[in-house]
Amino acid sequence: MVIDCHTHRNAPDPHAIISTSPIGFVAQGSQLWSVGLHPWDLGLFCADNLRIKDEIWVELVASSASPYVAAIGECGIDLSHGGLLATQMLAFRKQALLAERLKKPLIIHAVKAHDIITGMKKDLKPEQPWIIHGFRNKPTIAEIYLKAGCWLSFGEKFSPEALDITPPDRILAETDESQLSIDTIIMRLEESVQKSLRETIIENSKIFHPYE
Ligand SMILES: [Zn+2]
């Protein structure tokens, strides 16, 4: 059972999906993972700042095929800290297509990039869920993502107004790099909307393990 869809904590974390890079990826026990190329690290993963190095791509494709890899990512577009936009878009698009091919959800890191992400979604028309992780923007941005059919994952920092307008069936929760437990984070989300969300989040998180 998954309840925390995105964390960077160490394994084992039985109710979380641990996000990691594909470099040296090894599955451990029944731990679930997401593997992807983070936009901050594309300098390492790309040759001449333009294309993903072949050996990195081979490693990503091989590790993503593991049954313990429940999602692709985090990947995405970051207009504040990422590198060249063309490189980021190319790497994101490739990973989105990989997620489609493997029928696994996509975990997205997006900073000031809602137009680009939703534009690419319109273009690619993916069948797999696209999850905007660590969503902390205003409701107007939430609306844009929701209208495009994205899911929003909320963590320690979030906009109560944005959470308020998110339909329950699009809400996920995460610890990411927080020191708080997922239980505390969900409690804070519940306090904010004044209703229980735990069961909803567990139910929604079944997108990560559809065969159980
Ligand atoms: Zn993260």
Image (tube, grey):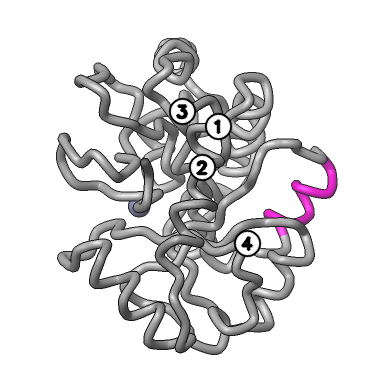
Separation (CA) of disc 3 from disc 4:
36 Å
At label 3, the amino acid type is Cys
Q: Using a 10 Å C-alpha cutoff, classify the residue at mark 2 as few (fewer than 14 neighbours), some (14 to 19) or many (20 or more).
A: some
Circle 2 sits on which residue? Answer: 206
Judged by its main secondary structure, the magenta piece is helix
At label 4, the amino acid type is Asp
Circle 1 sits on which residue? Answer: 210
Circle 3 sits on which residue? Answer: 46
Separation (CA) of disc 1 from disc 2:
6 Å
Q: Quadrant of residue 175?
A: bottom left
Left or right of 162: which side holds 8?
A: left
Q: Return the x and y of residue 81 as percentages of the image width and height.
A: 42, 59
Dot 2 or dot 3, earlier in sequence? 3
Q: Return the x and y of residue 24 as percentages of the image width and height.
A: 25, 17
Considering the numbered disc 4 on the image, is that residue within a helix, a strand or a loop?
A: helix
Q: Return the x and y of residue 198 as percentages of the image width and height.
A: 40, 65
Q: Is residue 122 magenta?
A: yes
Dot 1 or dot 3, earlier in sequence? 3
User: Magenta span covers which residues?
Assistant: 116-123
Separation (CA) of disc 4 from disc 2:
11 Å
Considering the numbered disc 2 on the image, is that residue within a helix, a strand or a loop?
A: helix
**Residue in the picture at 20% in, 20% down:** 29
